[in-house]
Amino acid sequence: MELATPHRKDLSMYRDILYKEFQEDRCFYCGKKLTNNIHVDHFIPWTFVKNDNLWNFVLSCPRCNLRKSNSLVSHDYIIKIEHRNELIIGTSTENIIRNEFNGYYNGLLERMWRYAKMSGIRERVGIAEAPVK
Ligand SMILES: [Zn+2]
């Protein structure tokens, strides 16, 4: 009965758009050069947004993605993803990409981050740093 609930779909299209079209070749969180194992991460966790939109996707190394899991990252990253989204909006002429940004505005991610936090999604601090022993 898995059709009854929203489910995660194949995100490789988003990986291709960000990696090939927008040359995002470094992990959004730690800045390391991405190799052939590239993870597509929901910046605001999927468990909260239940939606797949380009403005909420970043590319990440497996390590950061697994450490982040279904949590929020520190507030500082919001500025970074907003800049990234402005860049995409400013440079893309493709309808398929523009459509991804329907309903998006500067400040939306900030609001969602706060709502997610209020609803109990935990914040994972220091995702890109060395693990604590
Ligand atoms: Zn990383």
Image: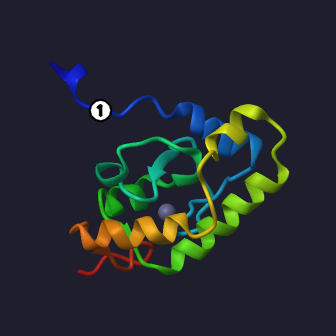
Residue for point 31% across, 64% down: 71
Where residue 84 sits: x, y (%)? 68, 62
Q: In this view, does 42 lie above or below 3?
A: below
Q: In which quarter of the image is residue 16?
A: top right
Residue for point 67% across, 53% down: 25
The amino acid at mark 1 is Pro
Q: Quadrant of the N terminus?
A: top left
Residue where numbered disc 1 is placed: 6
Observer-nearest residue: 118 or 10?
Answer: 118
Residue for point 42% across, 65% down: 112
Question: Is residue 44 visible to us here?
Answer: yes
Say which element carries label 1: loop
Q: In this view, does 74 lie to the left or right of 57?
A: left
Q: Is residue 102 left or right of residue 39?
A: right
Question: Is residue 58 visible to us here?
Answer: no
Q: Is residue 110 above or below residue 64?
A: below
Observer-nearest residue: 127 or 75?
Answer: 75
